[in-house]
Image: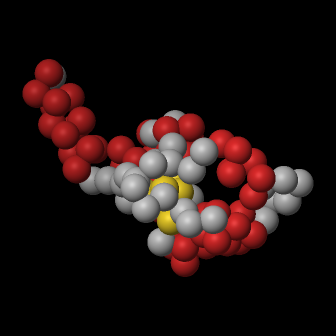
Amino acid sequence: MKKIIMLSAIGFMLSGCIWDLYPSYVVSDMGYFVDKNGNKAPIEDRHECSKGIGDLEFYAECLYTKGYRFRTESFAYCYRRPKSCEIYNKYR
């Protein structure tokens, strides 16, 4: 019984379904904007670019013009957030 559970868990992880189990707040932290030194964009710049506008394109373009580029830690970000990833990929 223990062997079946272990094999099922390994199969589940290798199948790629493990990304569905990541909480959304973990996935959100996988995608971010960085400057040329690799530092994440400060909260002041992020808030300035998102003031009153729910448009991802405007937000990404604003950060891009301030010198930040989009980065992800894992392909799980694009798997779970395809719309955001499609927009943000223009600003890499």
- The quadrant holding residue 55 is bottom right
- Look at the picture and state if 61 lies above or below 70: below
Q: State the residue at coordinates (40%, 53%).
A: 38
Along the line of sight, the residue nearer the viewer: 20 or 86? 86
Q: Is residue 26 visible?
A: yes
Residue 31 left/right relative to 55:
left
- The residue shown at (45%, 49%) is 39
Q: Picture coordinates of residue 47 (x, y %)?
A: 75, 48
Frontmost residue, 53 versus 77? 53
How many numbered marks appear? 0
Residue sitting farthest toward the left: 3
Q: Residue at x 54, y 63 (%)?
A: 68
**Residue occupying the far top of the picture:** 2
Q: How is the image coloured?
A: secondary structure
Residue 81 x, y percent position in the rendering: 56, 58
Residue 82 visible: no
Along the viewing direction, whichever of 79 and 88 lies nearer the viewer? 88
Residue for point 32% across, 53% down: 16
Res 50 quadrant in image: bottom right
